[in-house]
């Protein structure tokens, strides 16, 4: 399994790195910014799907070592994957809520249009009755 996914990272402002961070060993063949920046940034949840996320972890060789990527947030690959899946689930819930609210607004608009046509129809009947 190679490391390239063809996807790019969202823009972000990297933190100030120490000299020790800047000289840290970087993995070969990884298309993403260096590992030390990710250690401080935390894992990007929305840039990759789950397969891309796992591929990213493999690219950094965390399956074979005890590297902590999101320092202070996770100490194992399983925890990182759980963090990613939790973020995806939260994003899905937000999207579902937004879709629900949009559907509610659309229904309210249709109801208002129907009510307006009902009043117009009633007014037309009254005018016809008065005219007769």
Image (cartoon, grey):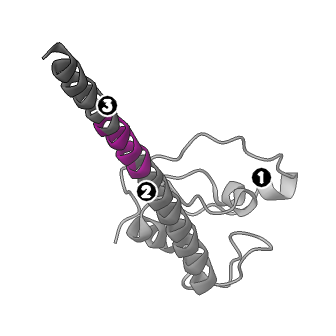
Considering only vertical position in the picture, is 124 above or below 24?
above
Q: Position of residue 36 (x, y in %)?
A: 71, 59
Q: Position of residue 110 (x, y in %)?
A: 32, 41
Compared with residue 84, is residue 108 higher up or lower down, i.e. above or below? Answer: above
Ranked by sequence position, the earlier of labels 1 and 2 is 1
C-alpha span from label 1 to label 3: 72 Å
Which quadrant is the N terminus positioned in? bottom left
Query: Which residue matches tag 2?
Result: 100
- Residue at the image position 56 percent from the left and 66 percent from the top: 90
| Mark drawn on residue 90 | none
Q: Which residues are magenta?
A: 103-114
Query: Which residue position is annotated with label 3?
Result: 119
Kindly identify which residue carries mark 1.
Answer: 22
Q: Residue 54 lies in magenta, yes or no?
A: no
The reply, left or right, for residue 120 in relation to residue 9 is left
In 3D space, how far apart are the residues under numbered discs 2 and 3 (Cα atoms)? 29 Å
Q: Earlier in the sequence, mark 1 or mark 3?
A: 1
Helix, strand or loop for disc 2: helix
Compared with 88, 116 (above or below) is above
Q: Is residue 107 above or below residue 132?
A: below
Front residue of 104/124: it is 124
Kindly report the distance in space between the C-alpha atoms of the residues bearing marks 1 and 2.
Answer: 46 Å
Which badge, 2 or 3, is on the more N-terminal residue? 2
Q: Residue at x 42, y 53 (%)?
A: 99
């Amino acid at each position: 399994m190679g490391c390239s996914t063809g996807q790019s990272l969202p823009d972000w402002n990297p933190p100030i790195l120490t000299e020790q961070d800047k000289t840290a060993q970087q993995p070969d063949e990884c298309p993403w910014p260096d590992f030390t920046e990710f250690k401080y940034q935390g894992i990007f949840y929305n840039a990759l799907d789950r397969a891309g996320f796992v591929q990213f972890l493999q690219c950094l060789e965390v399956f074979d070592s005890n590297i902590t990527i999101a320092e202070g947030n996770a100490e194992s690959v399983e925890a990182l994957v759980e963090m990613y899946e939790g973020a995806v689930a939260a994003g899905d819930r937000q999207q579902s809520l937004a879709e629900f609210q949009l559907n509610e607004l659309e229904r309210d608009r249709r109801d208002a249009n129907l009510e307006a046509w009902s009043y117009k129809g009633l007014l037309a009947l009254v005018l016809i009755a008065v005219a007769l």
